[in-house]
Image (spheres, rainbow, N blue to C red):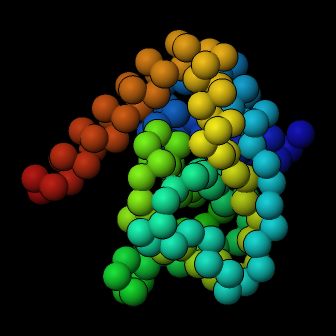
Amino acid sequence: MARTDAFIAHLAEHPLFAACSKKDLKLIASKATPLDIPAGRTIIEEGATGKEFFVIDEGSAVVKRNGRKVATLGAGQSFGELSLLDGGPRNATVVADNAMRVLILTRPEFAGLLDEVPGLARKLLIGMAKRLRDSDARAVQ
């Protein structure tokens, strides 16, 4: 239960899910699957088709674009959320910096949720709009 509560808290902090209710977040969390990843394993590959969203429960990962390190992600952070929406190509490679435990939400599971709870799509659009506004604001600065 503690892991589920932590996952819900991480989702609530994510811009995509910010407009979701606690009930929505619990439903989303119920569809997530935990996975242990060994150090050094490539989790996602830049340019590959995206199929899932990850929330880091334990450990850390390095994010690379065009072979250059651009970020390090740790517990509570996430990556791959755009794949839930469009299944497009990954814009970065993410490699486990050390042993990790992640929670994964796959695109088919997520699509099923949207079919099950149509109102969730509207809330996600609000979250995407916020993310786009934030991105726009950073680009202008």
Q: Picture coordinates of residue 32 (x, y %)?
A: 75, 43
Q: Quadrant of residue 11?
A: top right
**Residue at the left extreme, as displayed:** 140
Q: Picture coordinates of residue 24 (x, y %)?
A: 65, 22
Q: Is residue 38 above or below residue 28?
A: below
From the viewer's perspective, tell me whether residue 55 is left or right of residue 36.
left
Q: Picture coordinates of residue 85 (x, y %)?
A: 46, 39
From the viewer's perspective, tell me whether residue 2 is left or right of residue 115.
right
Q: Is residue 124 above or below residue 133?
A: above
Question: For the N terminus, which image quadrant?
Answer: top right
Q: Nearer the viewer, residue 50 or 26?
A: 50
From the viewer's perspective, tell me whether residue 74 is left or right of residue 18.
right
Residue sitting at 55 percent across and 14 percent down?
118
Residue sitting at 56 percent across and 69 percent down?
44
Q: Quadrant of residue 40?
A: bottom right
Q: Quadrant of residue 99?
A: bottom right
**Residue at the right extreme, as displayed:** 1
Q: Is residue 72 visible?
A: no
Total numbered labels? 0
Q: Is residue 87 above or below residue 58?
A: above
Q: Nearer the viewer, residue 43 or 87?
A: 87
Q: Is residue 34 visible?
A: yes
Q: Is residue 61 above or below residue 24?
A: below
Residue sitting at 60 percent across and 51 percent down?
52
Residue sitting at 39 percent across and 26 percent down?
125
Q: Picture coordinates of residue 70 (x, y %)?
A: 38, 77
Question: For the C terminus, which image quadrant?
Answer: bottom left
